[in-house]
Amino acid sequence: MKRLSSFGLCLLMALTTLAQNTLQHPDQFLGYTVGKRFSPHHRVLAYAEQVARQAPSQVKIIPYGTTFEGRQLLAVVVASEKNMARLEEIRTTHLKQIGLGNTPAATPQAANSTQPPIAWLSYNVHGNEAISSEAFMLVLHDLLNPTNAVSRKILSNTVVILDPGLNPDGHDRYVNWYNQMGGVHPDPTPLAREHSEPWPGGRYTHYLFDPNRDWAWQTQEITQQRMALYQQWMPHLHGDFHEMGPESPYYFAPSAKPYHEDITPWQREFQQIIGQYNTRYFDKNGWLYYTRENFDLFYPSYGDTWPTYNGAIGMTFEQGGGGRAGLAYRKNDGDTLTLRERIDHHYTASFATLESVADRPDDVVKNFNRFFEKSLTNPVGEFKSYVIKTANDEGRITALRKLLDNNQIRYGLAGKSQKLVGFNYQNQKNEAVTMESNDLVISAYQPKSTLLKILFEPKSTLEDSVTYDITSWCIPYAYGLKAYGLKEKLTPVAYVSPATATVPGATGSGPKPYAYLVRWQSAQEVQFLAGLLKNKVRVRVAERTFKQGEQRFEAGTLIITRAGNERLGDRFYQIIQQEASKRNIPLIPASTGFVAEGADFGSGSVFSLKNPRVAVIAGDVTSPTSMGEVWHYFDQDLDYPLTLIEANSFPNASLAEIDVLIMPQGYGYGKILNDRTLTKLKDWVQAGGKLIVMERVTSFFAEKPDFGLKKKVDKPDAKKEKTDKKPDTDESLREYGEREREAISEETPGSVYRVDLDRTHPLAFGYPNGYHALVQNVYDYDFLKDGWNVGYLKKDNYVAGFVGKNARSKLNNTLLYGVQELGKGSIVYMMDNPLFRGFWYNGKLLFGNAVFMVGN
Ligand SMILES: [Zn+2]
């Protein structure tokens, strides 16, 4: 919106006051002009509540949750009086039309011309991109301004939902810090302290996850709560408001390539329409902007792509600024960027975008409904059904069901046994598969069909390789599922949860077994084990496969004997019962410690587990998200104690109380790792400590005395070949315009590799289906000469995703996970991060193995 002249403003304010009686402007409510300072989250919400009180017939507040730090989450619905009076009817009719909602059998109905489109604008998902919440207050106020013709047009036919702040913990982390930095005047000098946000920064959630990478995976409670509400509304349009570096101007749609191939022609067309509306306003104001660069539509877990794969028009808006910009920031060109300018741009983009919907409400509704109609009758993709084997895979199936439920993807059971042919994700071959009646079946003929297809596609088609994010996310690989994609349509029967197994002996009656056995199969068993260890239950592990009666048990099976746990009395049974039933873990009673094949339970090759005291290096040497993933894993997944050590106190800290020390990915370790601290670490490992070193941190240990990690050396004959061979083209003669593309030839922005595993090593216990890693870094480490090469890549292990040509050759004959024994302790080198974004479910078992299984 063009800003009004002061005379016009006065006149309008007078008219507004007459019309609305007392709708308060945020300036009045806050006691300062918007843009004068940053507003804490509770003040932003208080303003929304004030407006709702003053305009109850047009504003409805929907509280939808609470953050980990106790801040409130809410959405604000703004509509005409007429639409507000029938809001619930609008919502339920809309869901019914697309086959969602409370009537799962519903089929899409013909579009009803009285259905208004629903436009949802999300502000401030990244906490330190704090202008969005300020812009929200102005948008809310001006939408209700009856003298504003654009607002009147929007509300006449569109229901608007505004989320004032998606990540309030991050927002307040930034705002509270910034407000402590300032004096009377903001200092625009870039090197002023107020432009250097300290670690971990306000971008992230409480657990330092990036909430704009979490839409599909929903690992964070703020995402889960928001997505539950979002899917009750299924908006036709979703706008996601961000900031980027302060030197950049403004970015809006159309998005950059790559576009995912399943984005519909209508969605592509609307990217252009949004662009035209925004262009018109930005041109009129003489503001700089760009389109079609940097922000693509591919990775499915963003605030633009996830809504797009759910039928909506999804887009990102980016204002130059962010955590560095503060109240005022002097850019390279000498101009000073102010907070108010940044706010005005988001305000304008919000209105331009809402207007683009309000100008064609019927088209928007019709095309949205068509998306869902096609999903039910002619879904995208070659697979029309997916069959997931469930036998002996309870943990992975439980995790998968949670993911599907959170995304409202429907599934059921096969209901009968049948011989079929399908694409086996594990070996990537079309082959015969016997579907059992208890196997999970997902049909592509359902409302969420496009999202399902994209989450399950074995290879995602990249139209252009320069992308912003990982290029493969295939759920059967991420979850380690025994899954098949089928070309035929299967109709599943209703899902019934398997009956909870009763624990023999746990009720106090009947014979007490000699031991309980638990198959070590997935991250769920790691949770179970953590629960037992925390309760001081002694647990033993079979190092080798064994057979008892007719049953075969793989290496890694937990053996929980009465012997050694006598001190717990009857609590022993209660704890086991409680920890197993929490996760529906089958307990197998054993009446004897004798085995038919393998080692008896009292054998030396059945080792005892410790109750390790675990610590992680936190603070500014680490990458916040990598540290956060470890923290979240222990706190939320395992509910197992983890000590966070402030990095700067590490050099002088005593490690005597720690059994396991984790060093997550980070770029600042040079500050704390030197000859002295490496010697200290080595002494601690030799005395029995276990060190887990992740990703780039491994480079501090490579080539260091006593640490076994070595860079690959070019083989002499290979070198010779290189120099002898005349290059076809001179590499110096490369094109400047191709530099971005060339840079990525050295990289893999997240591709899937099938890892060769030494499954006899405790680090690889529990992987009957093998392991697919999401490889994001290229390391050139040789196999350990003195240690165990547990996970590695030989030739041709590539499965999916983009890998640059030079990177691809380096990802041959290379080590991914290695274990070095040193004195009484061990070092686990992890070149790949199995906890990445908390969504690679199958990696959580690998990390659990590193913490609990290795080195006993
Ligand atoms: Zn952002």
Image: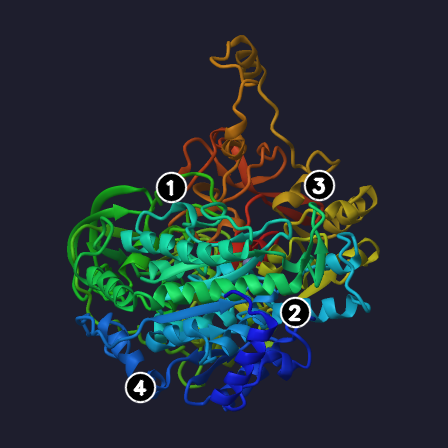
Residue at image mark 3: 700
Residue at image mark 1: 462
Give the class, few, some or many, for how many residues have Cα within 10 Å of label 3's Cα (few <14, many ≥20). Answer: some
Q: Nearer the viewer, mark 3 or mark 2?
A: 2
In the displayed structure, does residue 851 sit left or right of residue 704? left
Residue at image mark 4: 86
Q: CA distance from mark 2 to mark 4?
A: 36 Å
Q: Amino acid type of disc 3?
A: Phe
The quarter of the picture showing ligand 1 = bottom right
Disc on the earlier residue, 2 or 1: 2
Colouring used for the render: rainbow
Disc on the earlier residue, 3 or 2: 2
Residue at image mark 2: 35
Q: CA distance from mark 1 to mark 3?
A: 35 Å
Disc on the earlier residue, 2 or 4: 2
Q: Look at the numbered discs 3 and 2 and tell me whether their residues touch, using CB distance below 8 Å.
A: no
Q: Look at the numbered discs 3 and 4 and tell me whether their residues touch, using CB distance below 8 Å.
A: no
Q: Nearer the viewer, mark 2 or mark 1?
A: 2
In the displayed structure, does residue 775 sit left or right of residue 627? left
Q: Nearer the viewer, residue 535 or 117?
A: 117
**Helix or strand or loop: what does disc 1 sit on?**
loop
- Which residue is found at the position 34% from the left and 77% from the top? 156
- Which residue is found at the position 65% from the left and 75% from the top? 40
Q: Position of residue 464 (x, y in %)?
A: 41, 39
Q: Amino acid type of disc 4?
A: Arg
Q: Look at the numbered discs 1 and 4 and tell me whether their residues touch, using CB distance below 8 Å.
A: no
Q: CA distance from mark 1 to mark 4?
A: 44 Å
